[in-house]
Image (cartoon, rainbow, N blue to C red):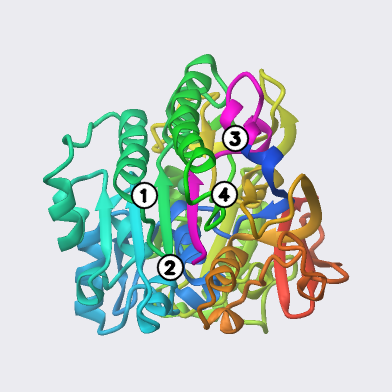
């Protein structure tokens, strides 16, 4: 019986997969199909991305619209989605599910199939991957211990060494936990989410010596899973997908953004969310117009989007351009100034960061629409996957869940935004077909922005955006 393991390396850029740093990811790539044009979603923040992986949908449908987002029942309050308890409380207070689209967890449970989550990511991130784990009897093991594990996960935890606090060690620990407890008889679908190389990219310098060493440690842990798989009896049954949720750009400057916002009369009474969101009192269209006009005058701002299709100021694009038109989204969403310049080690993509981010110059950041933030790793290998193939067809986070469902024969994928990656499965009728470039563009006398998207049929991927 076919089963699938999805391994997510949080924040791994495709160009950080190299023979000297990640020999095991290189070995894996040679076995199967690489989706060379895989893309993240917007905002390219971890919990937003996680919900897209789990549900096969863009944020406009799953409703996790920023890492720190507006409370659905009280737009003056913020919900920290990295905290599982905050998400549970938000559900009780608002009467609506945190994740609004059905995910792998629900769809597998409906057909009596086994689904497991092993994550060293935040407690909220584990929650988003399996929001009803206890109710559905699913195994969730968190690198943060019992408080973020399901009941089945808590029982498993008692048999394991305690999870380490250091993020790299925790990622290695969770990978080993999956290998040693699940490899012999894997669930129909497992998600193994490794919090590295994201943490080291943020704090140790993107592509620095320290970060490469930490990435190598996590790659080695993945290598032990590969060894067992290649040598074991499940070589034909288990299909493996390796992905990242977003990339990183290098911080080339800091800006005192909140100080500037709080000093700006135009923003009086507004609140500020993660993912570059601004909540405007009463969602007043006149104030939204004034605020977007002000943002477009600021050199530190790149893209500017606002809710609603009509009556936007010239230069501003609707949130639908970036697939973020959702009642939970902020009224105005911006990205910070970024570029295609290269960092000290030659990696493309730089961006400003805010001075309250606590991230160093040369550290990594993400959340925006730079092509290096949106470019992700997506590789598949196994008996059902085309070997030694590189696909130039568009792919993205929402395509992962429908592909997993297709591989294991569970229904529900057709209702998702994503497509089955038929080009990786050698099934030409499921390949995505012609991919049409679709530009969203707007300008005024002094400001000009452009969003590049690709479309194939009803599927859409965000490629990159620029302030021209
Ligand atoms: Zn992430």
Whether residue 20 is in magenta: the answer is yes
As drawn, the label of residue 25 is 3
Dot 3 or dot 2: first in sequence order is: 3
* Nearest the eye: 461 or 433: 433
- In the picture of the structure, the residue carrying the numbered disc 4 is 243
Camera-near label (4 vs 3) is 3
Figure quadrant of residue 218 = top left
The residue shown at (31%, 41%) is 180
The answer to whether residue 118 of the structure is visible from this angle is yes
- In the picture of the structure, the residue carrying the numbered disc 2 is 64
The answer to whether residue 252 of the structure is visible from this angle is no
For the residues bearing labels 4 and 2, Cβ distance under 8 angstroms? no
- In the picture of the structure, the residue carrying the numbered disc 1 is 184
For the residues bearing labels 4 and 3, Cβ distance under 8 angstroms? no
Question: Magenta region: which residues?
Answer: 1-27
Query: Position of 293 compared to 465: left or right?
Result: left
The residue shown at (67%, 19%) is 345
Q: Position of residue 428 (x, y in %)?
A: 82, 70
Asked if the residue at label 3 sits under 8 Å from ligand 1, the reply is no
Dot 4 or dot 3: first in sequence order is: 3
* Nearest the eye: 340 or 311: 340
Whether residue 281 is in magenta: the answer is no
Question: How many tags in the picture?
Answer: 4
Dot 4 or dot 1: first in sequence order is: 1
As drawn, the label of residue 449 is none
Mark 1 vs mark 3, CA separation in Å = 22 Å
Q: Position of residue 440 (x, y in %)?
A: 78, 67
Which residue appears farthest toward the front when viewing the image? 233
Q: Position of residue 130 (x, y in %)?
A: 33, 66
């Amino acid at each position: 019986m076919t089963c699938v393991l999805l391994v997510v390396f949080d924040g791994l850029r495709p160009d950080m997969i190299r023979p000297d740093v990640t020999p095991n990811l290189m070995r894996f790539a040679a076995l199967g199909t690489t989706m060379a044009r895989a893309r993240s979603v917007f905002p390219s923040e971890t919990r937003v991305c996680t919900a897209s992986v789990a549900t096969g949908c863009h944020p406009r449908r799953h409703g996790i619209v920023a890492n720190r987002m507006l409370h659905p029942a009280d737009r003056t309050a913020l919900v920290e989605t990295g905290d599982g308890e905050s998400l549970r409380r938000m559900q009780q207070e608002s009467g609506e599910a945190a994740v609004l689209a059905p995910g792998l967890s629900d769809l597998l449970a409906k057909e009596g199939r086994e689904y497991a989550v092993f994550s060293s990511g935040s407690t909220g991130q584990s929650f988003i991957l399996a929001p009803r784990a206890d109710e559905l009897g699913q195994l969730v093991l968190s690198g943060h211990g019992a408080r973020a594990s399901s009941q089945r996960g808590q029982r498993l935890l008692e048999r394991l060494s305690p999870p380490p606090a250091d993020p790299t060690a925790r990622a290695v620990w969770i990978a080993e936990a999956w290998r040693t407890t699940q490899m012999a008889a894997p669930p129909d679908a497992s998600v193994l989410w490794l919090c590295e190389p994201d943490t080291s990219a943020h704090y140790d310098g993107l592509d620095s010596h320290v970060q490469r060493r930490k990435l190598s440690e996590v790659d080695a842990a993945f290598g032990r899973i590969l060894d067992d798989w290649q040598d074991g009896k499940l070589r034909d049954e288990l299909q493996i997908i390796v992905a990242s949720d977003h990339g990183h750009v290098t911080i080339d400057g800091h800006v005192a953004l909140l100080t500037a916002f709080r000093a700006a009369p135009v923003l009086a009474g507004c609140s500020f969310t993660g993912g570059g969101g601004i909540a405007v009192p009463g969602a007043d269209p006149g104030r939204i117009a004034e605020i977007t006009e002000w943002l477009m005058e600021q050199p530190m701002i790149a893209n500017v989007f606002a809710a609603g299709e009509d009556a936007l100021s010239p230069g501003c694009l609707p949130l639908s351009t970036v697939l973020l038109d959702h009642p939970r989204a902020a009224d105005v969403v911006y990205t910070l100034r970024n570029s295609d310049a290269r960092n000290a080690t030659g990696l493309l993509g730089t961006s400003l960061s805010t001075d309250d981010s606590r991230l160093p110059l040369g550290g990594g950041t993400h959340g925006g629409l730079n092509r290096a933030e949106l470019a992700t790793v997506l590789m598949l290998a196994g008996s059902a996957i085309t070997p030694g193939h590189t696909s130039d067809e568009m792919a993205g986070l929402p395509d992962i869940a429908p592909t997993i469902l297709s591989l294991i024969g569970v229904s529900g994928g057709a209702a998702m935004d994503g497509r089955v990656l038929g080009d990786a499965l050698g099934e030409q009728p499921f390949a995505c077909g012609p991919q049409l470039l679709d530009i969203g563009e707007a300008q005024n006398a002094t400001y000009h922005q452009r969003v590049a998207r690709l479309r194939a049929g009803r599927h859409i991927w965000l490629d990159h955006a620029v302030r021209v």
